[in-house]
Image: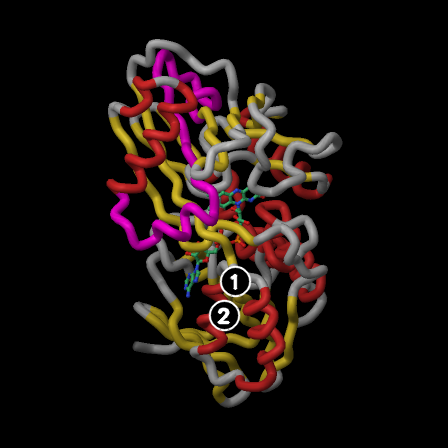
Amino acid sequence: MQTRKVDIVVIGAGMAGLSFARTMQQHGREVLILERSRAVGGRCATWRHADLAMDYGVPFLHARSPLFWQTVDELLGADVLSGWPQRVQGNGPTCQPRALDPGVRHAALRGGLNTLAKKLAEGIEILRESEVTNLKTLQGSLQLSGANVSLSTQTLVLAGANAESLRLLQASDFGPSTAGAMALFGLAPTLPTLSLLACYETPPTQPDWELLLPETSASIQLISNESSKNAAGHKLCLCIQARPAWSRQRLNSSAEEWACDLLRETAMLLGDWMMKPDWQRPHRWLESRLDSASRLRGPLLYTLAGCQLGIIGEYFNPAGGLEGAFLSGRHLADLLKETT
Ligand SMILES: Cc1cc2nc3c(=O)[nH]c(=O)nc-3n(C[C@H](O)[C@H](O)[C@H](O)COP(=O)(O)OP(=O)(O)OC[C@H]3O[C@@H](n4cnc5c(N)ncnc54)[C@H](O)[C@@H]3O)c2cc1C
């Protein structure tokens, strides 16, 4: 395979990688993103079925940053459902504890949160289904390789989840230069989440909430009413997200088993008919989000063999979560955009 030279290479088309790449491209730089999966967005994930778009990763946008909202409003305008969720039931914690605090703007997107990632990705060259597995320094450049890829660059940005970026550093020959980054990753493991989409074609009743945060359930962290983001007719589609500790204990169980447990718990909270959705779709997030206590102030930037290596993601901005991932990409772009 021939090795292609690119100005800037980003590994990961999640919110962090996309916000970085878009900003650098707007500053006239050549950027290429390599993405392991077929879709862009990473944990900003939406499942589309018939006329419905349902989020099964992060359930809604919440942020204080004017820069974040300016981007969202510019790109998605009328599809921003500002204020969602307005009807919240229960006092359990949200995934990011400050998500619904006064002063934090929140919103859903009519076509699902993944539409934000798709909009950010417009015009950027992205090689999908291209997992990078090896990094090395070679004659004053950084070399990347993996399934279908062989590239050489002067500026490389790691934009995966913590454990994914750590695996890449471990498989590199970067050695002691990045030992500090590897130690930092070890301090901030990402929590797992089991998530279940459940859809009821003709529900006997409709819940009067958009987000349910049960206080006492050992298994359920939250239930989001996904059909309330769409014009879903009479259908009811829920995304049931399990608590991290409960999820961790079941990562090796069959999806059928844990999905049944989550539906049983949902039925206890909301009614027996919940046990039998018309269809369901389980998803196992090995790395869903960081413990909110562990966040850094900014991205990491190294000089290796005369090249630049940046590391971004939700861990690298105090806001954390989706907002933190977006801002970490912008922050690194601000640091790099003047360099050639
Ligand atoms: C169930 C769930 C609930 C959540 N709830 C909230 C919430 O309420 N509030 C909040 O703010 N955040 C929440 N989050 C977290 C939020 O989604 C993430 O913080 C944010 O999306 C992270 O973006 P990112 O770009 O850093 O990483 P990702 O979105 O993980 O993007 C990384 C990308 O890199 C790709 N990649 C990784 N390694 C490689 C490789 N070697 N080669 C090629 N590609 C690679 C991956 O495929 C992925 O697409 C939740 C997440 C989940 C899953």
Dot 2 beta carbon under 8 Å from ligand 1: no
Q: How many marks?
A: 2
Residue toward you, 275 or 199: 275
Regarding mark 2 in the picture, which secondary structure is present there?
Answer: helix
Residue 165 seen by the camera:
yes
Q: Are marks 2 and 1 in contact (CB under 8 Å)?
A: yes
- Return the mark for residue 166: 2
The colour style of the image is secondary structure
Q: Bin the neighbour count of mark 1 within 10 Å (Cα to Cα): few under 14, some 14-19, many 20 and up.
A: many
The quarter in which the C terminus is drawn is bottom right
Q: Is residue 119 left or right of residue 68?
A: left
Dot 1 beta carbon under 8 Å from ligand 1: no
Q: Which residue is mark 1?
A: 162
Measuring from the top left, give residue 116's x and y in whole percent. Answer: 52, 39
Regarding mark 1 in the picture, which secondary structure is present there?
Answer: helix
The correct choice, above or below, for 285 with respect to 280 in the image is below
Q: Bin the neighbour count of mark 2 within 10 Å (Cα to Cα): few under 14, some 14-19, many 20 and up.
A: many
Residue 145: name its quadrant: bottom left
State the extent of the magenta-drawn residues as a range.
226-255
